[in-house]
Image: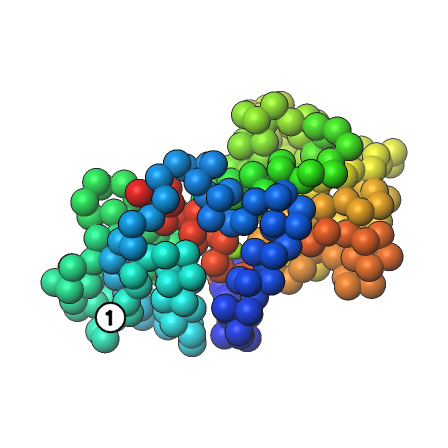
Amino acid sequence: MALLIPDDLRNINKQLQEADVAVQKVTGLDIKSICKALYGTPPLSEKVGIVPVTSGNGIIGSFSASLQAITQYFGFEGFVTDMPDVSGYYEAVRNGAEIILMADDHTFLAHNLKNGKIANNQPCTGIIYAEIASRYLKADSKDVLVVGLGKVGFPGAAHLVQKGYRVYGYDADEVLLKRAISNLGVIPLDLENPKQFSIIFEATPCANTIPETVLSENCMLSTPGIPCAISEELRKKHNVQLITEPLGIGTVSMLYSVL
Ligand code: NAI
Ligand code: 2YC
Ligand code: MG
């Protein structure tokens, strides 16, 4: 699993604000409204206990602090426990947490202790970035390209199929591409005769995964992928409307999904 590094999370509030402005520009809605459209109920400042976890590669500097900033930005009451791991979980519950947020190297979860609902960051991230992509006001058709059909990309592609989009897909892993074709009816992108798209959703841990040949002018690229899927030079050349952010958009999708 591709792990965040502290540098990805620098100025998380600024990154969140910039992403929110970009989402509003391309969809007409802010991130909170996208979440409300996706999941319904808005938050009532639920108490969110953020528990640092030391397993595996250990605590990522500013990960918990970033989660607290993210919960506050979206109207939740987040607090980070003093202790990590089991002691931290106990501390969170004892201090009135309604929702637990915690992550090891493989799973980042949100668990609502009141209603029992539980969410995983990977599908929640895929679904919200796909939803944002589907709401591009200047889309020229219902065609969308999905690059990366893994733990984030596949749920995102499934969401777009369910919304009635014609989903073209590509993944470097033949097995995962075949799975998306057979399970979702995704149309394999013909790299020999690529077509241009006004909506692109990318979820890979690699840079430069979007060939210039698929970019239409002013197209939208919605991508949680780190590093970014296109260079700043290519983005400017085709005036690509880029929606990307390292942690907050996926996290608020998790939180709304357990309300
Ligand atoms: P994954 O490993 O499950 O899926 C990535 C897929 O991309 C794989 O199937 C791989 O074959 C494919 N791929 C790699 N290079 C490619 C290329 N050049 N062209 C086409 N396909 C290529 O990873 P996962 O969990 O889906 O995460 C994807 C990315 O999203 C990672 O960078 C991860 O760090 C990031 N992420 C970001 C979040 C956010 O909130 N911004 C939240 C969760 C994950
Ligand atoms: O600081 C801590 O509590 C660490 N145990 C957190 C580990 C998070 C590992 N996951 C990731 O870095 C990525 C994020 C994009 C969210 C999902 N996976
Ligand atoms: Mg995000």
Q: Which residue is located at x 61 percent, y 57 percent?
A: 21
Residue at the spot 15% in from the left edge and 64% down from the top edge: 95
The three-letter code of the residue at mark 1 reads Thr
- Whether residue 67 is visible: no
Where residue 190 appears, as percent x and y from the top left, is: 80, 33
Q: Is mark 1 within 8 Å of ligand 2?
A: no
Furthest residue toward left: 94
Q: Is residue 197 left or right of residue 88?
A: right
In what element is the residue under mark 1?
loop
Q: Position of residue 197 (x, y in %)?
A: 78, 38
Residue at left 48%, top 58%? Answer: 248
* Left or right for 60, reference 162: left
| Quadrant hosting residue 90 | bottom left
**Callout count:** 1
Disc 1 target residue: 81
User: The C terminus appears in which quarter of the rendering?
Assistant: top left
Quarter occupied by residue 87: bottom left
Q: Which is nearer the eye, 54 or 226?
A: 226
Image coordinates of residue 250 in percent, x first then y, are 47, 52
In the displayed structure, 61 sits above or below 99; it is: below
* Left or right, residue 70 beside residue 53: right
Q: Is residue 62 visible?
A: yes
**Vertical placement of 19 versus 132: above or below?**
below
Rendering coords of residue 114 (x, y %): 18, 45
Are there few (<14), some (14-19), or many (20+) residues within 10 Å of tag 1?
Answer: many
Of the pair 229 and 131, the residue shown nearer to us: 131
Coloration of the structure image: rainbow
